[in-house]
Image: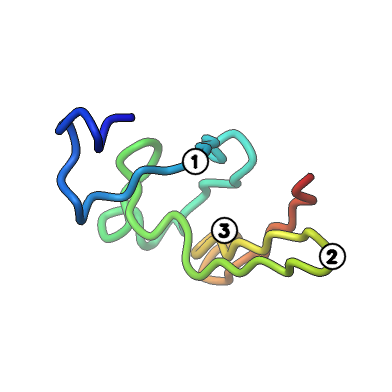
Amino acid sequence: MKRAAGALQPWQPQPYAVIDIDEHLLLSPPEWDVIMVGSGDQRRYRIGDAAFDRASGLLYVLEQYADGAKPVVHVWKVK
């Protein structure tokens, strides 16, 4: 483990698993706001809040500025 080996500080998170969700995001900031939110990999405010419904195994992720100025909620089934 990285923490036991001293590679991580006690306050640094050590994730169990990681997934890159960019391929599932729309990443289309409104044309009038590209200066503020950026575009592509440099885009700010990619995602907002996230919630996990343990009973149904659903992960909800809010993508801000996905449809112009409107957000989109993505839902994934976690197994």
Label placed on residue 56: 2
Measuring from the top left, give residue 17's x and y in whole percent: 53, 37
Question: Which mark is in front, 3 or 1?
Answer: 1
Q: Who's the residue at 15% across and 33% down the image?
A: 6
- Label whose residue precedes the other's in the sequence (3 or 1): 1
Task: Give the left or right position of residue 6, taking residue 14 as reference.
Answer: left
Measuring from the top left, give residue 59's x and y in whole percent: 69, 59
- Residue 39's place in the image compared with 67, above or below, is above
Question: Which mark is in front, 3 or 2?
Answer: 2
- Label whose residue precedes the other's in the sequence (3 or 2): 2
**Residue type indicated by callout 1:** Tyr
Farthest-out residue, front: 4
Residue 2 falls in which quadrant of the image?
Answer: top left
**Residue type indicated by callout 2:** Ser
Farthest-out residue, right: 56
* Circle 1 residue: 16
Measured Cα–Cα span from mark 3 to mark 1: 28 Å
* Marks 3,2: beta carbons within 8 A: no
Q: Who's the residue at 74% across and 51% down the image?
A: 76
Measured Cα–Cα span from mark 2 to mark 1: 20 Å
- Residue 32's place in the image compared with 14, above or below, is below
Q: Quadrant of the N terminus?
A: top left
* Marks 3,1: beta carbons within 8 A: no
- Of residue 21 and residue 10, the one placed in the foreground of this image is 10
Task: Give the left or right position of residue 75, taking residue 2 as reference.
Answer: right
Measuring from the top left, give residue 70's x and y in whole percent: 58, 71
* Circle 3 residue: 66
